[in-house]
Structures are given as structure tokens and as C-alpha cells.
Amino acid sequence: MNQASPRLIVTCDEPPCPPFNGNNRKSFEVIEALRGDFDIHVLTYPVDDSDWKKLQEHWRSRGVTCHRLYRRMAKRYQRLLTSGLSLPTVTRDFSSEARLVKLLHQEVPKSQLLIDFISGAPLLREFNGCGTVLSGHDCMSYLFEQEGRFASCLRDKLYLRLRRRFALNAEKRFAHLSARTHVVSSQDAAELRRINPRARTTVIPIGGDEADTASLRPMNQRHLRIIWGSLGSGLILSGLRRIFNIAQREDTTALQGWTLIGRVPEAETRTLLPELDSLGVTYLAQVDDIDMLLSDTIALLLPDIGGTGQKNRALDGLRHGCCVFGMAEVFRGIESPGSRAFVSCNDYETLVRSVSNIDQWPCEDIGKRAMQLFVSNFSRPVLAAQWRALLSSIGWLEPTNPTSSHLCAFH
């Protein structure tokens, strides 16, 4: 990296490297998209030495510098109760984060700060206004509200209600302090502005690398039909139960030969979904290589009944040329102008009938349009251009002081 390059300081709650989940994949893709334009420094909290080693090995050859931070575990529950903020937030060492940011900023005055995820928002007490982005992903309080609506027991409902309260507190206190607050869908932006009208929201979708075309099998040679979603989510489990109930009532062969990937142990899944065998659905808790699996998938069914943000699973299906089925929720923030690039249904009865008649769908044509849609709207070059435009609009980082935090001209 040229020494004249501007510096981007990224704080992450979780290391931005494989294995991925909903939290760290977005930060990984942003860093990957921007590393050619910025001298990137990542401040993060590895779980252990092995986690730290994987992070370093992944980014060292890519010109990204990583800094290790340690969580403050002592008296964490006391801080949780007194602050009204989440456990991931109160265990962060914001004093060390602020010191590192100041040192990195002193080395390169043309620096900007990207705070990835709402748990890092209290850092905005030290740095706010010019040069700062709070990347909240989703409007988290809205997500927990949605999850709570479909929680299966009182304990889970109370737990999600508590998480929603912590998220609300963070969004109300901090979301307006950054030059921009990034979310991944327009609905998240609207929900966040409803909670904190002073927040200056910017919508940039999630995205990533295009599929390796050499590994993609032609549609007429694919044979897998996949149902995908973590059964630990009430929003996914509730949707899947509706699908299974309709299939049992109307057409027990509708899902025969499909494979469910659900992330929870098989014994637990068979308790949650005892009708698996009678419907002819095979179960896998996880797979070693999801890209390889999707490269051999004709149809991908995503059962989500609600939620927020965008679905990495939907975009993964599109980029691999699968014919993706789901309710409108699954395709939030994904528009398909003109010819169909996925199959969005208005009710679960229609969804079940659609997947039961999969042979009647032009899956190959839909899959080709799906890949084109991904390249045009969600590929890494598109992602990079949108993030560069955002960062070019916020100026350079400056330590917070009473007179300077409102002097930056936000456009």
C-alpha cells in the first residue's frame, strides 16, 4: 500500500475472516472491496490464540494490518445492568480501542473510522462527526422485535425482549453521532430513523465475490434441491413449520428428495420437525463447502417468515445461478426488474405449490438471470464503488471536541 493512501480504521466485534456468520461476513466483504484503495487497519476481538492466528494469516498477504483486543469480562453483568447495553458491548475495551484509533490517526491524518456493528457504537463518544461511519447492518431492535413475535416459548420471548431493549438504547444514544449510519436495506433505514430521527442513514446492500464459473455445473446436470436456514432462528423455524404443515395437508410429496441444512444437531431437529421422514426430507446440520453445494443446486428454498436486513443466503443462491424460492421477506432489497430472476410468493400455500411443481419452472433461465442480477447489483466492484462514494462524502477523522463535531458538511 502506498504511504500516501488514506487510512481506514475498522473496528469489529468479531474477526472478519472465515468461518462466516451474519455478523462478520459483511465486514469481510467491505474490507476486501476497499483494501486496494486504503491502508486498512482492523481492530477486533479474537476468541483465542487460534482465532487470532487465522485472522493474521488471512489478511497478512492482502496488505491489511490487524490489531488484537481483549474483552473486559470482570463485572460484565454489573456493567450490563447499569449501562442498559448488551453483553457484546459492555465487554469491549473502548479505552484501548480509542487509544489505538488515536495513534493510527496521528500516523496518518487522512484517516476514517468504520465502526462495524452496533456493539461498537459507544466508541463514538471519543470520535464522532467527520470521518466516521457506524455500520449497523440491520436495525437490530427491529430484528429482535421480529424474532420475539415468533419465539416458541416464554423464555425466548423474554430474552429477545431484553436484547431489543439493549439495541434500542444503543440506537437512540449513538446512531446520530456518526457522519453516516450504514444499513443494508431501505426498511432498516426507515426503522432506524423512526427510533432516532437524527441518524443520517445510508443504504448499501451486502455483496461479495462472483461465483467461480468454472465450478458451476450446467443446470441440466444439477441434481440438488436445498432448503437452507438456521433452525435456531424463530423466523426461519416458524416459516419452515408452515411449509411442512401445508405439505402434509395438501401434498406429502411436495418436498420429497429435498435436503434441509439447518445448523442445529440432527437430534434437536427431529424434535422440532418430527415430520422430516414422512415428507421425504433429508437433514444436514452443515456442509463443508457451501459454494460447492450451491454449484450443484437446481432449486433453493428459503423459508424465512419475517426479519430485517438482507439475506446472505438469498444472494448466495443468486450468485450460483440457483432458482431461489421464498416469500417477499427473503428478497428484501433485491429487485428483479423485467424478467424473473427468482420466485417470490405472497403466501405459503403458493410457495409450497411452486416448489412441488419445480419441473414446470424454467430454472435454467431464472438461474442465468439470477447471476446477472448479482453481478449488476451485488458483486464486489459494485460494493466497492458504493463504499468509496460514502467515504468520500464524510471528510477525515478528528477527535471529538465540543465545538468541532457539527462542523463537517454532510451531504
Image: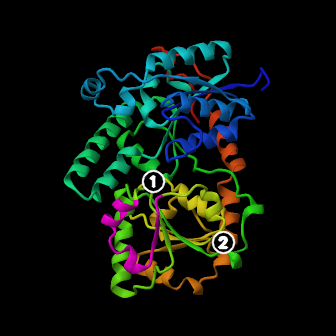
Q: Is 167 one of the magenta-colored residues? A: no
Q: Is 269 one of the magenta-colored residues? A: yes
277 left or right, relative to 356: left
* Residue extent of the magenta highlight: 266-285
Q: Is 366 located above or below residue 8 in the figure?
A: below
Q: Is 388 located above or below residue 189 in the figure?
A: above
Tag on residue 83? Answer: none
Task: Give the image location of residue 243, x and y in percent.
Answer: 39, 74
Q: Residue at x 44, y 20 (%)?
A: 94
Q: Residue at x 64, y 37 (%)?
A: 31
Task: Give the image location of residue 20, x and y in percent.
Answer: 55, 46
Q: Secondary structure at mark 2?
A: helix
Other-residue count near label 2 (Cα within 10 Å), few / some / many at <14 / 14–19 / ≥20 = many
Q: Residue at x 40, y 85 (%)?
A: 252
59 left or right, relative to 265: right
Other-residue count near label 1 (Cα within 10 Å), few / some / many at <14 / 14–19 / ≥20 = some
Q: Residue furthest right?
A: 2
Task: Give the image location of residue 380, x and y in percent.
Answer: 69, 48
Tag on residue 367? Answer: 2
Q: Is 86 located above or below residue 401 in the figure?
A: below
Question: Which residue is at the front of the view, 345 or 216?
Answer: 216
| Residue marked by disc 1 | 187
Residue 114 in sight = no
